[in-house]
Amino acid sequence: MYLESPPRRLRARHRLSAGSVRQPDRRGRAPGRAARRLALAGMLLLASAPDVGRAQTRIPDGHWELVQNGPQPDRALHGMIFDPVSDSLWSFGGVEADTQGSDFHNSVWRFALGDPDPRWSLVPISGLKPPPLIFHSTVYDPLRQRMIVYGGQIDRSGMGQSLSDGNTVWFLDLTDPDAPSWTRQSVAGILGDRFAHAAVYVPGFDAMVVSGGASASNTLLNTNYALLLGETPLRWQRLANAGFQARAGQALIHDAAHQRLLVYGGFGNFNSASTIRNLDALDLSAGLDGADVWTRVSTANPGLARAFTAHFFDAERGLWWVHGGQESANRFSRRLSVLDLGPSEPAWTETNWVQNGPLDRFGHTAAWDPQRGIAWFQGGTPDNNRTLADLRALVFEPGATPTASASPTRVASPTATGTSTPPEPTPTRSPTTPPPDATPTLTGTPTATGEPPSPTPTRGDPSATPSPPAPTAT
């Protein structure tokens, strides 16, 4: 559910325009303000861009747009990444219809943003593949152009559930986007299976960090590990657990500018059904050896207590955007909050961007497209009884996208212990984009307001044991 934007500036700058996703002109200028009223594939609905009630001028203006284009996967509790090389969104797994049922999926869907008429398509993959999963993590590995899938639930039974083997890691190779393929590796060293955890790629150490989550008996976990992707064979490195509050359904990012991990929100206790508002940090400046401790980060404004949000991190500006989630028992959110991480004390701000935005939901997913300055949000559930299929774009106003610099090159894989300033590996391929005059064919007439029709739950077992209890804010 998370994709970090590269801390380095990107070469191209994109905007929604003229019925397609367009490149800037040859002099690198963004299209004029009139282009704001045009839409991706003619199917994005333009919303007004009300001024955000923000205390920080660093936060750009933006607006929501509803994408109604092509068959869209009806999913919740799934994962989605943005691959800049194939210029596509990739979605995996999740549950369909009744989130308390057992209609889990292991299908892969692709939304090719570079196509003249972009739309979701089911990707046929033969051979080895993961089991149907929910509550798993999906992370993008930019050095190897692949999706990493870890953990999650594969079945529900009684008060517990069957989980994916904690020593098994799945990799979806995207180097040939027309024929992606799965591989599986067994990596010993992590303590126990888990679901509803958080994961993030840390480029300075070429590692995937896995944090918290819950066991098959719904026991919350306070353990943190890093999967060292540059080592042969792969291995897990235990990270610091001291000071880390056991939690599940939290959000996790790597803040490269401050050389730290940040964790926010989540369930604090399944039995008392409580959610967390705390923001905690782990300093990585000395490496991944686990010698440090997690510390509480104070913010100018308190964050909301919620779990299973959709979020993305704009590392270029140091802005962490969080949408929706579960705030309390039977209370789901549509709030869009942003945490400004610098240069002064971190501060939460609540936006008032509502029109055409996602309505109340949790278990949805987000991916950040730094090339265009657009965040993509998909799916989720508003009430645990049905899942949603809509794809929404959070578009920032002109001038919000940073200027680009020269493309970085691949560097050697960093070591697990790291240095005070670890190198930042980046992909060597350049993203593919459509020609500037690409004009797709309209496929329907969108409506301007309201939630798209929700699918009627026809699958799943309504009597199945529900997922972890609804939380109560503390």
Image: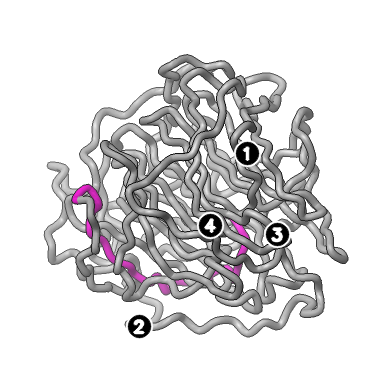
- SS under mark 2: loop
The image position of residue 193, as x and y in percent, is 78, 44
Residue 76 lies within the magenta run: yes
**Does any portion of residue 172 appear in the rendered image?**
no
State how far apart marks 1 and 2 are (Cα): 38 Å
Which portion, as a residue range, is magenta? Answer: 57-79
Q: Which mark's residue is nearer the viewer, 1 or 2? A: 1
Label placed on residue 110: 4
At label 2, counting other C-alpha atoms closer than 10 Å, the crowd grade (few under 14, some 14-19, many 20 or more) is few
At label 3, counting other C-alpha atoms closer than 10 Å, the crowd grade (few under 14, some 14-19, many 20 or more) is some
In front of the other: 452 or 50: 50
Residue matched to label 2: 449
State how far apart marks 3 and 4 are (Cα): 34 Å
State how far apart marks 4 and 1 are (Cα): 25 Å
Q: Which amino acid does label 4 sit on?
A: Arg
Q: Earlier in the sequence, mark 3 or mark 4?
A: 4
Q: Which amino acid does label 3 sit on?
A: Phe
Residue matched to label 3: 270
Quadrant (top left, top right, bottom left, bottom right) of the C terminus: bottom right
